[in-house]
């Protein structure tokens, strides 16, 4: 049986998620920030983390955005193969972004052309990714991505001989070069494998997984812990003021690749790693 979903339902859900994601961080990020504030030994860093935690409470209580950069709306849809959308799905998503950013008084940051610029005035179009999955449900996730951190992201086509050491070196070099620019403490989405285009999407997808949920493969779960420790050993600290809390989490996603390649991408996200989801 095919299940029909009106495009208007998608629009409404996207609008609500845009507002929610910009006002409330996911529980795993909030918990990690609070824990870091309790455990950070460097006084300046501890004070900075405490201010960030206070900012989260203020945003939630006053119904204000957590950050002034309310991001480019990255929208991920897991679309059941037994679902029929009554209408234009991409247009419904953009309409939801348009409504959400207007209703939530969120800053519009999208330009119509990468070189000639010109603000679109409504934060559209969204960066839409659709994956077909089994079933008759539709799962929406809205990720408002700020560009202070997005600009610090990087991709490299390593050689297979570079191996895991090459991956470690690239991740650390990326964080070291970013310094205080992405408003640390940061969260890293690391993609390994695939092709030039797929590895970047892997890194973005990695940011969708809660940071308190390790990779299901023990090998990569151990690498996530190792990289997090190494990144925090750089001493950049919250907002670049020093300390041991440079990152709150490192998530890795992988996929098969060509025998001659080892693509790696690092998607850098600030402490305001926003995501909100709903199932229709």
Image: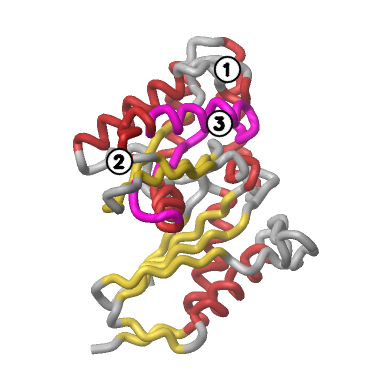
Q: Residue at x 47, y 41 (%)?
A: 266
* Spatial separation of the CA atoms under disc 3 and disc 2: 21 Å
- The first of marks 3 and 2 along the sequence is 3
* Spatial separation of the CA atoms under disc 3 and disc 1: 12 Å
* Spatial separation of the CA atoms under disc 1 and disc 2: 26 Å
Name the disc covering residue 45, or none.
1
Q: Position of residue 50 (x, y in %)?
A: 57, 24
- The magenta span reads 167-196
Q: Quadrant of the N terminus?
A: bottom left
Q: Which residue is the site of mark 3?
A: 53
At mark 2, the secondary structure is: loop
Q: Position of residue 69 (x, y in %)?
A: 67, 47
View extreme (left): residue:
218
At mark 1, the secondary structure is: helix
Q: Is residue 5 above or below residue 188?
A: below
Q: Residues within 10 Å of mark 1 (few under 14, many from 20)?
A: many
Q: Which residue is the site of mark 2?
A: 213
Q: Is residue 137 above or below residue 190?
A: below
At mark 3, the secondary structure is: helix
Q: Nearer the viewer, residue 89 or 67?
A: 89
Q: Residue at x 64, y 70 (%)?
A: 99
Q: Is residue 249 above or below residue 136?
A: above
């Amino acid at each position: 049986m095919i299940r029909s979903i009106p495009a208007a339902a998608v629009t409404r859900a996207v609008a609500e998620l845009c507002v929610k994601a910009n006002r409330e961080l996911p529980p795993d990020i909030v918990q990690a920030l609070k824990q870091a504030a309790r455990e950070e030994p460097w006084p300046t860093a501890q004070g900075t983390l405490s201010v960030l935690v206070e900012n989260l409470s203020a945003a939630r209580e006053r119904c204000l955005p957590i950050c002034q950069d309310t991001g480019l709306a990255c929208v991920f849809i897991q679309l059941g193969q037994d679902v029929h959308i009554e209408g234009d799905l991409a247009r419904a998503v953009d309409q939801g972004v348009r409504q959400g950013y207007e209703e939530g008084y969120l800053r519009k940051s999208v330009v119509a052309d990468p070189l000639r610029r010109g603000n679109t005035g409504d934060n559209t179009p969204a960066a839409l990714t659709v994956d077909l999955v089994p079933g008759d449900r539709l799962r929406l996730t809205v990720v408002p991505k700020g560009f202070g951190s997005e600009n610090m992201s990087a991709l490299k086509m390593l050689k297979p001989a570079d191996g895991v050491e090459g991956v470690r070196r690239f991740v650390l070099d990326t964080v070291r070069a970013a310094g205080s620019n992405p408003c640390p403490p940061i969260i890293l989405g690391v993609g390994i494998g695939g092709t030039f285009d797929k590895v970047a999407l892997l890194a973005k997808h990695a940011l969708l997984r809660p940071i308190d949920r390790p990779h299901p493969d023990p090998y990569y779960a151990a690498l996530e812990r190792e990289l997090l420790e190494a990144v925090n050993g750089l001493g950049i600290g919250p907002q670049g003021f020093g300390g041991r809390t440079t990152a709150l989490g490192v998530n890795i996603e992988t996929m098969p690749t060509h025998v001659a390649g080892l693509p790696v991408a690092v998607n850098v996200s600030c402490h305001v790693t926003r995501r909100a989801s709903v199932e229709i």
